Image (cartoon, rainbow, N blue to C red):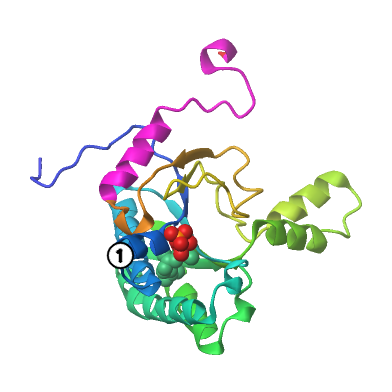
């Protein structure tokens, strides 16, 4: 057995984990640092968690990078988040590609500056055929908007079943399995307009860790908690049904 062998942490790891990366500002405040430093550390945590997810073998991970409500933050903070986004896309695209990881962005990207849109398009095109894992970053994303735009595009179907099929096919997460596990850091227990439709049967995991401190160990804790949950999808307990 190779010396770096790590046994699987659970026999039923989630296929898709979604993250609400919360607590960057508090992480910085507690250290007397500007909020921008918290966001920088948050971007480092994002990189770390993707790496850990790929090593553990999680096929899909989605991160709430910028919500449609985040535009209401002070201009200086928005500028800093955009700077970080540029930096992340520039520095991570090649690394993700090298590691056979696909990057997808969901949300209304048209509101971002043209150079950011180009960086997103370039990253998506370069990594399109990568198979090891898919990383989805939600940018200017809102769950209600996603539902509304999918329904709007499907509106011409008069038959309910074909409407439902078309609706699902128009969600921004089409071709992606629904999240099994939704993780939110920093002690907040809300879904905050994230993947509203897609999280219908997700297990929720809330932890006090602030996002910049999130790492492989805290990720493994979340996965272990998930493994201990009994998922019933509205049906009977397994031993009652079989
Ligand atoms: C919440 O912290 C976090 C965000 C506003 C979005 C997440 C942003 C990052 C992880 C930075 C890098 C992102 C990308 C996509 C490169 P908060 O500011 O709401 O924290 P607080 O609640 O403690 O104030």
Residue 215: % across, % down = 29, 52
Who's the residue at 41% across and 64% down the image? 25
**Is 240 a magenta residue?**
yes
Q: Vertically, is 102 above or below 16?
A: below
| Disc 1: which residue | 99
- Count of labels in the image: 1
Extreme residue in the left direction: 3
The answer to which of 121 and 43 lies nearer the viewer is 43
Residue 154: % across, % down = 81, 59
Q: Vertically, is 40 above or below 135?
A: below
Q: Vertically, is 105 above or below 110?
A: above
Who's the residue at 46% across and 48% down the image? 184
Which region of the structure is painted magenta? 216-241
Residue 41: % across, % down = 32, 66
Q: Vertically, is 130 above or below 189?
A: below
Q: Is residue 131 visible?
A: no
Q: Is residue 225 visible?
A: yes
Circle 1 SS class = loop
Residue 44 as seen in the image, left or right of residue 165: left
Q: Quadrant where the N terminus lies?
A: top left
Q: Quadrant where the C terminus lies?
A: top right
Q: Main secondary structure of the magenta part?
A: helix
Residue 43: name its quadrant.
bottom left
The answer to which of 159 and 143 lies nearer the viewer is 143
Who's the residue at 37% across and 40% down the image? 222
């Amino acid at each position: 057995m190779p010396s770096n062998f790590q046994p699987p942490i659970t026999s039923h790891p989630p296929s898709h984990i979604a993250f609400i990366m919360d607590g960057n500002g508090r992480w910085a405040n507690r250290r007397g640092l500007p909020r921008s430093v918290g966001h920088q550390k948050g971007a480092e945590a994002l990189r770390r968690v993707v790496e850990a997810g790929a090593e553990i073998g999680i096929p899909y991970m989605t991160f709430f990078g910028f919500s449609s409500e985040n535009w209401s933050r002070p201009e200086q903070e928005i500028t800093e988040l955009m700077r970080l986004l540029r930096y992340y896309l520039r520095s991570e695209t090649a690394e993700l590609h090298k590691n056979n990881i696909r990057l997808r962005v969901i949300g209304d990207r048209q509101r971002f500056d043209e150079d950011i849109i180009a960086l997103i398009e370039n990253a998506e095109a370069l990594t399109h055929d990568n198979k090891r894992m898919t990383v989805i970053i939600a940018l200017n994303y809102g769950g209600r908007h996603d539902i509304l735009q999918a329904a709007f595009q499907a509106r011409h179907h008069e038959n309910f079943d074909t409407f439902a099929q078309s609706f699902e096919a128009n969600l921004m997460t089409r071709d992606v399995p629904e999240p099994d596990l939704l993780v939110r850091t920093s002690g907040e227990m809300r879904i905050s307009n994230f993947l509203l439709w897609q999280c219908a049967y997700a297990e929720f995991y809330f932890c006090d860790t602030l996002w910049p401190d999130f790492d492989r160990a805290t990720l493994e804790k979340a996965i272990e908690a998930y493994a201990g949950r009994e998922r019933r999808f509205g049906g009977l307990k397994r031993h009652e049904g079989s």
